[in-house]
Image (spheres, rainbow, N blue to C red):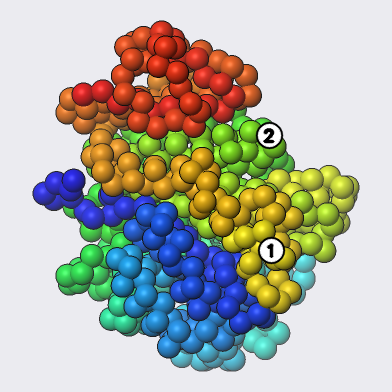
Amino acid sequence: MSRPGDLWWKSAVVYQVYPRSFADSDGDGIGDLVGVIDQLDHLVELGVDVLWLSPVYRSPMDDNGYDISDYQDIDPIFGSLESFDRLLAATHDRGLKLIMDLVVNHTSDEHPWFVESRSTRESPKRDWYWWRPAREGMSAGDPGAEPTNWRAAFAGSAWQFDETTGEYYLHIFSTRQPDLNWENPEVRQAIYTMMRWWLDRGVDGFRMDVINFISKDPALPDGRALASGPYADGGSHYVCGPRIHEFIAEMHREVFADRTEAVLTVGEMPGVTVDEAVLFTDPARAELDMVFQFEHVGLDHGDGKWDVRSLDLRDLKASFGRWQAGLADVGWNSLYWNNHDQPRVVSRFGDDGADRVAAAKTLATLLHLHRGTPYVYQGEELGMTNAPFATIDDFRDIESIHAYDELVAAGRSPHDVLTALRAMSRDNARTPMQWDASKHAGFTTGEPWIAVNPNHVEINAESARSDQGSVFHHYRRLIELRHTDPVVVHGDFTMLLPDDEQVYAFLRRLGDVELLVVANISTDEVTADVPEADAWARSVLVLGNYPVSKLLVRDIVLRPWESRVYRRA
Ligand code: TEU
């Protein structure tokens, strides 16, 4: 199937494991590495190629491990380097690759580098982070004295005043996630050394957390005021900042260029544009293999993510269409609906009521038939839904809890904020994986760190595996199709019916082979008004989510949430 010059990951499918919520082997209520080993055959049956492991490093867990205090050790709640090596070997034994999460925009405030950096202004590690005095003419610690007006992603100012030395440090995320100063070449070399250490240990690449934030404008100018609140959006001074391509190209030279084994690098990049993505992923520039972009997961945000809007299908098609076109000749994209930061797609863009199964399959079909590398987030292959969080005490995520406090303090009603959190909170993705119908869904024998979704009695891996009509088997077929039909991997892409409010349809073409993907994104019965509908309706139906009568061969009439993939050659 692969052609000369192809890069292996173009035909791969990646499965993301969020270890905390995947499988708990020791009954402490938190998932762990042995739990992942125990469930690897689930990934094998699904047919994926790569396992992406969210952070398992030593961490105080302020942000569930995205705050790392030791890059070269495993946190005891997850296991040890020894259990990690066993997982890696077990993954490789099954013909899968394993990529690590690389979180190097920031460390934990408990990382020895930061502990040393904050100890005195003269510390040799002082310049490893961003330390600044109070704003000119103001006293440190006073409101508004922060060095810039930037807002932090998890509420409040992006600067934290530190009594010990009377200066502020920068943290784009929580106060316990100080940003590393990539301007300092020692920082960069320390990170490259650590990355080489993991590759030498046998890992197959990295998913790089907010990697497009590592280059900041060293002048640290103020940002643009936000619609509400005292702080501003500093993004234009650190999203794809002035030296970003230089740093990524240097990382490639220092860490990856001399490797002969097949590795994968994917950059998580909030705010990245199509033009920037082309630069990051043009093989000739030797930076990264692919990016995660955020455009489609922001289409239902109004004034920020807690101002929830309903999705207009035309916006979704315009966004996907633009990315498909922009990366058609040069570069490569990732395809995802879900990860540990996003609500569950079947609840968000689909239907988690009566049409849950049809909707989950149709959303999967759409995503997996685009050009790019698909990512499946644990439980997505079961059609797992958002969780019925009742009160703020049911949430665990730092972002959700801070947002609640901040918005309620600003005068929004608790009921209204909870409604927004129920729709958009990251905890929707973080409820335990639903393995079976037993207590706690087979995730743990202890008390889970976050409640299991009560719908696990119906939605779980055990029942899905034994039902050929399940969402799971639909994902399995989609993955198999990508592995066996080169048009799915390499075919060019043409969006159809961009203005239709219910039908999502597109063509893929490679040489003489053509695929038509047509989907009903509604609960109405609709006629898909695609060109040559007649001829298509008589061609080979490769995949669908409803039985189709061969006698109905004129128009393409789709039932609620129905999707079909036709092929002709
Ligand atoms: O996320 C970066 C990011 O910008 C978001 O997806 C983030 O969750 C969003 O701001 C929430 O509204 C990455 C990780 O995926 C996320 O889990 C971490 O919390 C974050 O970086 C900091 O490391």
Q: Residue 243 at what x, y percent from top left?
A: 36, 61
Q: Residue at x 14, y 46 (%)?
A: 3
Q: Check disc 1: other Cα within 10 Å, few if <14, some if 14-19, many if 20+.
A: few
On screen, residue 552 versus residue 10, left or right, reads right
Asked if residue 177 shows in the view, the reply is no
Q: Secondary structure at mark 2?
A: loop
Q: Residue at x 56, y 28 (%)?
A: 561
Mark 2 sits on what residue? 354
Q: Residue at x 57, y 35 (%)?
A: 359
* Image quarter for ligand 1: bottom right
Of residue 549 and residue 3, the one placed in the foreground of this image is: 549
Q: What is the spatial separation of the Cα atoms under label 1 and label 2, in whole angstroms? A: 23 Å
- Up/down of 334 relative to 360, above or below: below
Q: Residue 104 at what x, y percent from top left?
A: 45, 71
Q: Residue 421 at what x, y percent from top left?
A: 74, 51
Q: Quadrant of residue 21?
A: bottom right
On screen, residue 346 versus residue 180, left or right, reads right
- Up/down of 551 relative to 444, above or below: above
Which residue, as the protein is rendered here, is positioned at the far left? 4
Q: Residue 24 at what x, y percent from top left?
A: 60, 74
Q: Earlier in the sequence, mark 1 or mark 2?
A: 2
The amino acid type of the residue labelled 2 equals: Ala
